[in-house]
Image: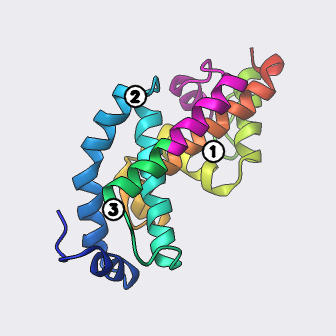
Amino acid sequence: MERSTNKEQILADIRIGKEEVLQDIYNANRDAFLTWSRKRFSCSEDDILDAYQDAMIVFYNNVKNKKITNLESTIKTYIFAIGKNLLLKSYANNQKTTLSDNIDDAIVRKVDYTVGHKIELTHRQQVLSGILNQMGDVCANIIKLFYYRNFSIEAIKHELGYKHVDVVKSQKLRCMKKLKTMAKAQKDSLF
């Protein structure tokens, strides 16, 4: 997994932009984290994967911003601890508010985003289109490219200038959660 010989060197390599070191850490710990999380948390596979990707982003940002320069634990333990805290936080939030799962991919795909299109949208599609317009460019673009224009995650990565497909996947998951939350707030209009 780790091309460098010690944790301090690995952190230094990440800090100077050696992406292969970060990718090695990601790949070496992903399956172990997923397996570990499945046994300990009652979360969906997407939530677990999202927590792992977010943990990797936090780890990367902490290294780049020099919040961590020396670890007492292993890198794996550090990432697992971040992921565990994210899953616990997500669980606590979900206990307070259950997101509506009635907004699914099929509904998102039915919304027509082209300007000047002559087909009238259903009320539900109009509300969903309005929500997308409120979400901001990043989320709206990712959702439109993926669901309406049928772009692959790899194609979205290139289209929007992301460096890694994992970032696109994680962002798409966050955007869909945001969409579901916003749709739940407008539940009376949608359903």
Q: Quadrant of residue 130?
A: top right
Residue that label 2 marks: 40
Residue that label 1 marks: 114
86 in magenta:
yes
x and y, in percent, of residue 163 in the image? 39, 67
Q: Nearer the viewer, residue 17 or 37?
A: 37
Toward the bottom, the furthest residue is: 16
x and y, in percent, of residue 127 in the image? 77, 29
Rendered residue at 74%/34% (across/down): 182
Residue that label 3 marks: 75
Decide: few, some or many residues near mark 2? Use Cα within 10 Å; few <14, some 14-19, many ≥20: few
3D distance between C-alphas at marks 2 and 1:
45 Å
Taking the image as shown, residue 34 lies to the left or right of residue 187, namely: left
x and y, in percent, of residue 68 in the image? 47, 73
Q: Are the residues flagged by discs 1 and 3 in contact, CB closer than 8 Å?
A: no
Earlier sequence position, callout 1 versus callout 3: 3
3D distance between C-alphas at marks 3 and 2:
20 Å
x and y, in percent, of residue 77 in the image? 35, 53
Q: How many marks?
A: 3
Q: Which residues are magenta?
A: 85-112
Decide: few, some or many residues near mark 3? Use Cα within 10 Å; few <14, some 14-19, many ≥20: some
